[in-house]
Image (cartoon, coloured by chain):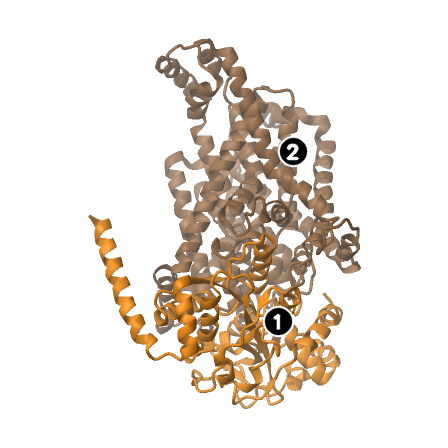
Chain colours: A brown, B orange
Amino acid sequence: MKLAASEGTAKGPAGIRPARPGPLIGFDSALLLWLLAVAVLALLVLNPLLRLVIASFQATETGEFTLANYPLAYSPRGVRALLNSLFYSGAVTVVAALLALPIAWAMSRTDMPGKAFVRALVLGAFITPSYLGAVGWILLAGPNAGWINRVWMGLTGSQSGLLDIYGFSGLVFVTALYGFPYMFVFTADALDLVSSEMEEAANILGAGMLRTTIRITLPLVLPAILGGAIITFLDTMALFGTPAIIALPARINVMTLQLWQFFEFPVRAEAAAAYAIPLILITCLLFGARRLLLGRRGYVTLTGKGEGRTRMRTGPWRWVLLGYSLLVCTLAVFLPFAALAQAAFSRAWGRGFSLENLTLGNFEYLLFQQFNARQTILHSFTYSAAAACLAVALGLAIAYIVDRRLVPFGNALTLLATAPFVIPGIVLAIGFYAAYAAPPFALYGTAAILVLAFTTRFLPIAYVNCLAALRAINPEMEEQVRILGCGRIKAIARVVAPLLKKSLAGSWLLVFIPATRELSTAIFLVGANTRVVSVMLLDLSEDGNFETLSALGIILLASTILIALAGYKLLGRDVLLRKA
Amino acid sequence: MIRTGRRIVAILAAVCTGVLGISTAAAQSDHEKQLYDGARKEGQLTWYTAHYDQALATKIGKAFTQKYPGVQANVIKATAQVSFQRLLQDIKAGQVQSDVFSSTDVSHFVYLKQKGDLEKYVPENERKIVAAFQNVDPDGFSAVTWAGLVAISYNRDKVHEAEAPNNWPILADPKWTGKVAVGDPNFSGMVGVWTVAMARLYGWDYFKKLNQGKPLIGRSIDDSVTVLNAGERVVAAADPAPTLRSAAKGNPLAVIYPTDGAVAIIGPSGIIKGAKSPNAGKLFLEFLLSTEAAKLVAENFEQSLRPEVTPPPGAKSLAEVKIVRPSIEEIAKDLPANKERWKETFGM
């Protein structure tokens, strides 16, 4: 990295002609940048949040001040749904950790074979919309007719199946299968940055592999694990698709299902706002708890780019590790997609496998006959791409200001840029709805409101990524340019941005991929002419048009993989699943 | 070059449609002709609809323009609640975008009528539809343009036609324990109306009994089709339209119209007050009740409101099945309480 950077600087100044004295211009442009960043952040984060708080105290018809929304939202049933959600999210976080941590560790620290393959499969789980995975799992583990259960009943002659997806454990399991990649990304990234010197020291002092891992490695990456855990927890709190498909039949009421009912006639968006407020408090508490837990050992994260890392030799255990990784990926990707593929390539999926039942018709219908489907897919990709561009640009601007300490209130900016982490997607959508749907903005039903909401929702990913990348660049390089007489903006454009090209593209993809599958925000904000694939998938599931639904899911998966593969090719393998 | 070429094609097309327009206009009634003349001056209309799926709604819009050249129909399809939110948003902002509003939730029309947001219009074609669906709003602010049913669907591979439940009480019989699927009135308007009908016919105990049979509760009424195809459950309270659409692909599904009555859900349409194209809107309302539209609807396995249109294979026409239709007042009175009782009975 450093070598490449110094090459960049060597070339940089040669192309830049000395111009007017820099500092004044630099100060001005930085101030402008700062003001712009604050304005945009306030627009994207503060405004919807404030609107949310205000709306929760307004009467639906008159807009007068009232406290009535709170008792309406916090009926005993509402409280129970909230508690269910907390418990559900907690359980998902634990299971996701069990799935993610061993794989992340094996990938980063050991000589496990087949790493590239496993990484690609984790990517597959990352880009799978969780509700699509949930549908796949209903086909696999439905208590009466699920494939796994039918095989089990066939083998054992048992009258009842082995698994029942319609229960709390089924719900947690399926959610965790698609939630674990976040935790994986965070942990693997941290493990990659930690130098192995301390592990070696432990080894020299006689600690075995297990002891070293638990006593040395684990504490070193604890902050990253906690970060990933919080993201997983919040993601689950805000999840709508999987609970709609599994929790409802299992008769488990969770917060998002409860929220949805406020949007049935008569719509009580104000009660929904009241219901969402404490979520912000809960999430602030989570981050507070994290700070409390880690506050005294902040030093562990300061190890920077790890140098001289060695892979642990695990002998025959490496096959066990590979087996575990493949098992998790099979459960998350292979099995459910096999089930979906059966429907996608069938004329009538209820007929099961047979040659004459095989068809490409569902794909043909979507891609060539139904104009709307193509348009919807296009919407998804263009909105996500636009959101990714905005998020990365904004993330980079704020990260730069904060990292180079250009302004006194850098911490306030960090707070704003990471705040969307603490707003579950569904709540964010309600805030956006309150802030921008009505005049003067009148963005209801426009593409802009979706792009802005996606940008806000995934801004923290871009911000964190850019910040990490910026820290790897020595500021001296821009300073040289500025000594030669360039302004701050020019220094950023000609030196920093080119050096960061790979990281920026990586952040772009890390925003783009989740944006294409984003449902919880979209479902409230999508208009008649701005449908996106995630919403269309849910619509199709309601029409009972399962063949087309599966085909659309496979198209979504395939096109995202193509985009991701293009990313691989352009940028080298690691960018996709590493934060920096 | 290409641009000029396109322009020429466009001009030719305009000329052709103009000629065709004159020829269709010849067969029109005076009333229709009057509306069409007005509509042509307006040039277009916008239809906010919760009826049908996107593909069928678009098809109906195109068929309208084909019948009435020079009047473009902009079809904006969304779910009932989203369409309604959008409409209210437009009205609030003083910018009415839609001329015709169609919903599957009758309460929307009760609300709009009360607020004075609807324009009175009784379509001429209304007296040609199945009698039970005429004159639903005696004041003439809306007309029924869509009807859905809740009947019983079953998986033919797992249940013989002779054994399948042919009335609603059988569905709650212990014989079908663990085999039934239903929707949830808190998430589906059609299921809501179905609960109103069932509770009025058999009392709320019907649902207590049903719950003992451990039904699988989906979100939408149409989730049942998926569950039946997967073989996860074998009988369901379901909408015949998606069931028959799926059966037409070759899936092992069939419909039974219960002897004690399939539950009818009505979807009205109305003209929005202050609409930019009132004539086109009225003409479109007439078209929704025409045999042309009814044929398109029936081809797509939805219920035709015109009795003379033959239903597709496996389906029955509204005129030949026994129907239970809770009134708008009954729905308004019972539904909120039913939603709460449902949660209690089924333990949500």
**Hey, which residue is sitting farthest left in the picture?**
B1
Above or below A221: residue A283: below
Tag 1, which secondary structure? Answer: helix
Q: Which residue is found at the position 58% from the left and 52% from the top?
A: B93
Q: Spatial distance from mark 2 to mark 1, Cα to Cα?
A: 54 Å
Above or below A368: residue B298: below
The dot on residue A223 is 2
Above or below B3: residue B20: below
Q: Which of the 4 image quarters holds residue B8?
A: bottom left
Q: Which residue is found at the position 51% from the left and 11% from the top?
A: A23
**Residue type indicated by callout 2:** Pro
Q: Which residue is found at the position 44% from the left and 14% from the top?
A: A486
Q: Residues within 10 Å of mark 2 (few under 14, many from 20)?
A: many
Marks 2 & 1, CB-CB < 8 Å contact = no
Label 1, on which residue? B106
**Residue type indicated by callout 1:** Val
Above or below A527: residue A47: above
Q: Nearer the viewer, residue B129 or A90?
A: B129
Residue A323 place in picture, x, y as percent: 51, 49
Tag 2, which secondary structure? Answer: helix
Residue A314 place in picture, x, y as percent: 53, 38
Residue A491 place in picture, x, y as percent: 45, 18
In the figure, is residue B72 to the left or right of A400? Answer: left
- Which chain is mark 2 on? A
- Which chain is mark 1 on? B
Would residue A113 be seen by someone viewing this image from the given angle?
A: no
Quarter of the image with the C terminus of chain B in it = bottom right
Q: Which of the 4 image quarters holds residue A101?
A: top right
